[in-house]
């Protein structure tokens, strides 16, 4: 928790105010039973005692005006105290709500800002699923605990200690009863949680299991029915379901012990106080009103302990969340802009040059790329081909600096990529990733993602080249057709075409297509490629692919095998001299097509 | 437990009876504090409740026992303070007498009273536990049963249903909705009883002490209920807003983190941060407001409660001096006033809780009552040693009845023939698969296997005749051995391994850690796409079907694996009638029949040569391959 201290600091003044208010609230709440005891002891008893004396006047059963005055006055003070208590409780509530929400807001902004600055290396390290949880759920956890921290953890000791002082003030000989009640309570709470908490964890696992089995039986519906395995799936589900139900039953039955037990302890406490208190009263060491006040103090103290024990169960979970958030905030991205960045100038073109580049993924044992050197020239298409795992995608991911090279350098437009800002570098690249990703919004907003100011003509042209205009104009909303989160409302092929259009709309000097044509059928692919050729004109085009037919006419083909370049040249040249290329090509094309 | 303790008063009566939420069933991250949530309404409250009561019928005895026990425990708890009050009075009178010198405290009487009360409290606690015990059993059973019913229902649903219902929705019914039903049901069932009994019981007890004080209490206490209601209404808006914005914000975070590569490639950092800040500040406002408003509830209730407390103290004091009531009565009365508020608020809230129950139950029942697959033929024809002749006889089909995609299609696949299905992306090539496997039924016409309409067979028998290898491979979280054996559960280990060998999968399986015993993880991403495909082929080989349905696409597979897959598929197709969604030219050219699809319909059919000669759509596609090669 201390690792996030920086984010708590702005709220310290408010926090101090809240704590003062908590003291006021506690004081008022603790003073109330005292006033009540005075009504009983002074107001009623004096009159009562007088009435009990046979020597007293006959009209003794009528309260004296003094008594009435005293009671009303005391009552007035009590109301005032109540008002103070309620007022400070409301203010504390306001402050704690603002602190907790504010803290959560600040943390969210900080974490999000940090994650956005992360490169692929950090994403690999944390995994994006985990980063999402850290930004959302973990911060929620912290927010919830922050609220209860203020209203419970700080309040409980104040009321506990205050209550003990007051209770001892009423009767120093009965405090052991409180001690007894608190210890019994602690034993019960701890025992219940000792038994239940490990089961909670098991239960979470079983819930995950149930979810997994249901998810599988939904996603595999066709296969399950194809093999007539419905009964089998039902049995699988049933065993997960039964395990969960059994554990749930056990945990629930343990947890339902808590309520009656706590009631019993509270009630037993009252009874014991009356019994012991009665003796004290009889021995004239205590007054009845004091005993009643003592009873109320005792209950408040026990509750304070109960709250504290609950918090000790909650806090560790929040501490885990806080640590997970702090981990993100303390991670410095491996890639950062140079302190004195160079700029591209008018002489910078789209040339991409790899100079003896080697690369190793963080934490890996071996390099994935070994001594890669080649130059991709403007106005030409450079294709990179090779088997899965040969490092094709890695090569193109190095150009926009998603990762930094381990050795060697990459020069774009005459500048080492590490000497310019990431923003300037990336503004020169139209990148189409392997997995087409669209953002929620409209088709238009996605195509303009690179630059909101892109004019309509450029957007339309990009759509035309990527063969997307047809389906865009097919819907009445056209460019304003909504794209839902994750782009689930468009098909895979459409998504890919839009991703290509998005890159083209940038009109960049460099285009990178990372295996971007796989979801397209041959015909669309061919049309797209023909249009592309005309559009990219003087730009440098880099294409990663597995299909030989896609790149047969590229000016330069780089063949990769296990991270090294095993050949480069045109299709014809490579067919001649490169064994790996020939192998790939023959597996895909028939003889007549190869010739 | 609230942090703001009532200043005085014993909390014994009905203390915190708001049942403990069953563990592991937390609501949304910020969903549940202050007992306030965004109220959801069922469309048909009465109907849903009736179905729910019918569903609960099996537990009617247990539920009656719970009711009786709940009444008992509540009555015992309510009687307690009143009897306890007499102990205080005895003490008070005794001590006064002592001071006055006219007597002593009657400890025997006090002891007897205390023991009686202790017995009452013990009984109440025991009964509460019994009630909780039985209720836990019932709610777990309901949860179990609902989930089992849903899971079985899934298998009886037509695939059509899942075309426009996403899996997340069904999953959320299995987990969240079932959870909500069983949790809220347990809560409201006991609360209705205990609250009503408490309110009535407390009222009676209060009247027996003093009608005057009761009237004062009755004026003050409902105030808190009104106040709570007001606050709940006001804060609903913010809770709703908060819930919405949590959704928006999480959506944005997921989207940006998931697509961070694209975001970075297009310099979208600033834009995404600006959007987050916007969402974040709205969430902040809604967050603290809803939190604050729900936090208001306790102090206000507490204040109003104290009003009653003070009023009762003064009035009680005056009455006690007049000897109308005793000191013990004041004490008891204070306790009653305190315990009056809670059941009242609970009763006020119970309709909300029941609405929640109904809304969740409605979704569950809705699913359970969905139309199921067309029932099997009454006397299904048995399939005996099928030859594998498939005939399409004037088939017409549409996913939705109003929109026919396949107009009028007739064709024959002779035993052992290879039928290639070709067409551009999105032309509906998998429709044929779905019809053959009877995931969907034809609208008109018929599909015949060996001369018998497939609707005459039982689905199980029919599907046993077919083997299916789809591009969208499906493996489950289990070992490789189990995954292959899925094709024929009775197969021995040797048979599984033989099938893997035929599918060219044996070699790579042996290179994996633990070999055949390696567990495919939950995302099925610990083996490659190509390897997954080989496993599904092995599965089909093991099943040894007469007719095959294959999807050839191997776009994300490297060339070496692709060669293996090709060979494995060839092994599989040997001597079997096969329908292939073709991506390879060689497959297409060698096919005995090519079905050309476009926009869902079959536009051409014939052999490669015939179709080229026709110079139609097929010829156009085929020729574009060369185009395509020359375009790069």
Image (cartoon, rainbow, N blue to C red):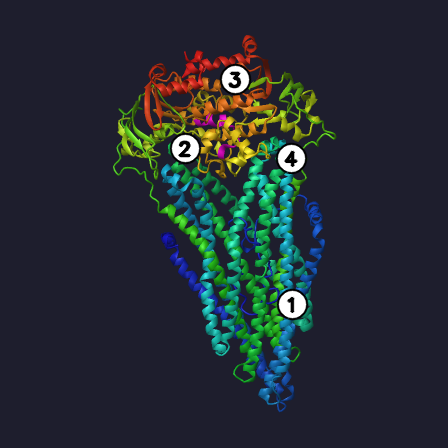
Q: Is residue A353 magenta?
A: no
Q: Position of residue B46 (x, y in %)?
A: 70, 47
- Predominant secondary structure in magenta? helix
| Residue bearing the label numbered 4 | B157
Q: Secondary structure at mark 2?
A: helix
Chain-order first, disc 2 or disc 1: 1
Q: CA distance from mark 2 to mark 1?
A: 66 Å
- The foreground one among A591 and B243 is A591
Q: Position of residue B575 (x, y in %)?
A: 58, 19
Q: On the rendered structure, is A262 left or right of A448?
A: right
Q: How many C-alpha atoms fall within 10 Å of the one at disc 2: few (<14), some, or many (≥20)?
A: many
Q: Which residues are magenta?
A: A486-499
Magenta segment includes A490: yes
Q: CA distance from mark 1 to mark 4?
A: 50 Å
Q: Residues within 10 Å of mark 3 (few under 14, many from 20)?
A: some
Left or right: residue B238 versus residue A117 is right
Q: Earlier in the sequence, mark 3 or mark 4?
A: 4
Is the residue A103 above or below the residue A449 in the image?
below
Q: Position of residue B571 (x, y in %)?
A: 53, 22
Figure quadrant of the N terminus of chain B: bottom right
Residue A582 as seen in the image, left or right of residue A341: right
First in residue order: circle 2 vs circle 4: 4
Which chain does tag 4 point to? B
Give the residue number, with chain letter if any, for mark 2: B262
Distance of label 1 from label 3 (alpha carbons): 81 Å
């Amino acid at each position: 928790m201390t690792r996030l201290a920086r984010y708590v600091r702005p709220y310290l003044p408010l926090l101090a105010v809240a704590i003062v208010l908590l003291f006021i609230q506690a004081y008022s709440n603790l003073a109330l039973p005292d006033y009540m005891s005075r009504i009983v002891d002074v107001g009623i008893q004096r009159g009562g005692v007088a009435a009990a004396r046979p020597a007293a006047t006959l009209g003794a059963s009528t309260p004296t005006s003094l008594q009435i005055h005293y009671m009303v006055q005391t009552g007035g003070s009590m109301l005032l105290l109540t008002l103070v208590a309620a007022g400070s409780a409301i203010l504390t509530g306001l402050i704690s709500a603002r602190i907790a929400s504010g803290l959560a807001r600040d943390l969210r902004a900080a974490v999000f800002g940090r994650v956005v600055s992360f490169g692929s290396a950090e994403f690999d390290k944390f995994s994006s699923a985990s980063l999402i949880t850290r930004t959302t759920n973990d911060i929620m956890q912290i927010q919830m605990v922050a609220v209860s921290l203020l209203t419970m953890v700080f309040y409980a000791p104040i009321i506990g200690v205050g209550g003990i002082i007051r209770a001892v003030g009423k009767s120093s000989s009965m405090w052991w009863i409180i001690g007894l009640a608190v210890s019994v309570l602690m034993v019960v709470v701890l025992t219940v949680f000792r038994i239940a908490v490990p089961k909670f964890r098991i239960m979470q696992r079983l819930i995950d299991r149930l979810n997994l089995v249901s998810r599988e039986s939904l996603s595999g519906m066709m296969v399950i029915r194809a093999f007539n395995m419905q009964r089998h799936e039902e049995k699988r589900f049933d065993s997960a379901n039964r395990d969960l139900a059994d554990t749930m039953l056990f945990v629930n039955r343990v947890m339902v012990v808590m309520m009656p037990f706590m009631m019993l302890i509270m009630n037993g406490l009252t009874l014991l106080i009356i019994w012991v208190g009665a003796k004290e009263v009889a021995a004239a060491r205590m007054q009845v009103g004091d005993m009643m006040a003592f009873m109320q103090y005792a209950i408040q103290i026990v509750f304070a302990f109960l709250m504290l024990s609950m918090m000790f169960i909650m806090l560790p979970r929040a501490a885990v969340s806080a640590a997970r958030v702090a981990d993100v905030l303390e991670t410095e991205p491996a890639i950062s802009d140079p302190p004195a960045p160079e700029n591209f100038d008018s002489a910078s073109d789209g040339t991409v040059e790899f100079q003896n580049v080697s690369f190793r993924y963080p934490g890996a044992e071996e390099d994935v790329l070994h001594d890669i050197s080649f130059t991709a020239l403007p106005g030409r298409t450079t294709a990179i081909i090779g088997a899965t795992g040969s490092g094709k995608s890695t090569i193109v991911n190095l150009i926009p600096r998603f990762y930094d090279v381990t050795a060697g350098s990459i020069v774009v437009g005459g500048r080492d990529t590490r000497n310019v800002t990431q923003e300037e570098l990336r503004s020169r690249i139209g990148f189409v990733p392997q997995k087409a990703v669209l953002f929620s919004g409209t088709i238009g907003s996605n195509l303009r993602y690179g630059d909101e100011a892109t004019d309509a003509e450029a957007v339309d042209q990009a759509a035309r080249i990527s063969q997307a205009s047809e389906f865009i104009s097919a819907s009445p909303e056209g460019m304003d057709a909504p794209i839902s989160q994750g782009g689930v409302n468009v098909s895979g092929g459409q998504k890919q075409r839009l991703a290509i259009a998005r890159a083209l709309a940038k009109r960049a000097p460099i285009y990178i297509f990372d295996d971007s044509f796989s979801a397209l059928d041959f015909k669309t692919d061919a049309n797209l490629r023909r249009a592309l050729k005309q559009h990219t004109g003087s730009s440098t085009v880099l294409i990663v692919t597995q299909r030989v037919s896609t790149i047969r006419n590229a000016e330069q083909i780089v063949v990769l095998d296990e991270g090294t370049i095993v050949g480069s040249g045109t299709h014809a040249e490579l067919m001649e001299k490169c064994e790996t290329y020939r192998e790939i090509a023959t597996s895909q094309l028939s003889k007549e097509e190869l010739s | 437990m609230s942090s703001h303790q009532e200043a005085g008063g014993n909390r014994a009566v009905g203390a915190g009876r708001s049942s403990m939420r069953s563990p592991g069933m937390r609501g949304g991250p910020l969903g549940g504090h202050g007992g306030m949530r965004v109220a959801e309404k069922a469309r048909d409250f009465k109907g849903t409740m009736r179905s729910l009561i019918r569903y609960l019928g099996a537990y009617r005895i247990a539920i009656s026992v719970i009711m009786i026990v709940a009444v008992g425990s509540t009555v015992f708890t309510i009687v307690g303070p009143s009897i306890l009050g007499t102990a205080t009075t005895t003490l008070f009178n005794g001590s006064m007498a002592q001071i006055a010198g006219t007597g002593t405290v009657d400890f025997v009487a006090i002891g007897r009273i205390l023991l009686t009360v202790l017995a009452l409290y013990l009984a109440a606690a025991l009964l509460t536990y019994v009630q909780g015990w039985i209720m836990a059993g019932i709610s777990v059973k309901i949860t179990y049963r609902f989930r089992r019913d849903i899971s079985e229902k899934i298998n009886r649903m037509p695939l059509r249903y899942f075309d426009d219902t996403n899996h997340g929705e069904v999953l959320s019914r299995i987990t969240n909705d079932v959870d909500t039903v069983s949790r809220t049901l347990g809560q409201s069932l006991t609360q209705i009883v205990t609250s009503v009994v408490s309110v009535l019981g407390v009222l009676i007890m209060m009247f027996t002490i003093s009608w005057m004080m009761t009237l004062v209490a009755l004026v003050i206490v409902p105030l808190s209920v009104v106040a709570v209601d007001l606050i709940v209404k006001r804060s609903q808006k913010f809770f709703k807003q908060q819930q919405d914005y949590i959704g928006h914000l999480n959506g944005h975070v997921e989207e940006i983190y998931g697509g961070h590569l694209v975001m970075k490639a297009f310099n979208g950092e600033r834009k995404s941060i600006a959007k987050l800040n916007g969402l974040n500040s709205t969430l902040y406002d809604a967050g603290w407001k809803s939190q604050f408003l729900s936090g208001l509830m306790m102090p206000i209730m507490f204040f109003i409660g104290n009003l009653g407390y003070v009023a009762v103290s003064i009035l009680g004091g005056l009455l006690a001096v007049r000897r109308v009531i005793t000191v013990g009565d004041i004490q008891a009365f204070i306790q009653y006033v305190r315990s009056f508020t809670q059941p009242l608020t609970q009763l006020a809230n119970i309709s909300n809780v029941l609405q929640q129950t109904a809304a969740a139950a409605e979704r569950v029942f809705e699913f359970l009552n969905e139309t199921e697959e067309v029932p099997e033929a009454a006397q299904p024809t048995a399939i005996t040693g099928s030859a594998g002749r498939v005939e399409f006889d004037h088939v017409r089909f549409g996913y939705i009845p109003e929109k026919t995609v396949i107009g009028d299609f007739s064709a024959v696949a002779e035993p052992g023939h290879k039928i290639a299905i070709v067409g551009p992306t999105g032309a509906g090539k998998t429709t044929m698969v779905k019809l053959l496997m009877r995931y969907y039924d034809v609208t008109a016409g018929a599909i015949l296997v060996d001369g018998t309409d497939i609707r005459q067979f039982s689905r199980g028998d029919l599907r046993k005749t077919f083997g299916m290898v789809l591009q969208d491979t499906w493996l489950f979280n289990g070992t490789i051995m189990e995954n292959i054996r899925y094709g024929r559960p009775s197969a021995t280990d040797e048979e599984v391994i033989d099938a893997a060998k035929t599918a060219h999968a044996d070699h790579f399986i042996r290179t994996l850690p633990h070999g055949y015993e390696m567990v495919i993880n939950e995302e099925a991403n610990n083996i490659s796409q190509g390897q997954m495909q080989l496993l599904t082929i092995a599965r089909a080989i093991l099943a040894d079907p007469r007719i095959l349905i294959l999807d050839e696409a191997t776009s994300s597979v490297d060339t070496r694996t692709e060669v293996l897959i090709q060979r494995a598929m060839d092994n599989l197709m040997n001597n079997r009638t096969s329908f292939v969604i073709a991506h390879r030219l060689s497959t297409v050219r060698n096919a005995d029949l090519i079905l050309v699809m476009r926009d869902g319909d079959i536009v051409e059919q014939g052999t490669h040569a015939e179709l080229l000669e026709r110079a139609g759509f097929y010829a156009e596609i085929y020729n574009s391959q060369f185009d395509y090669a020359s375009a790069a």
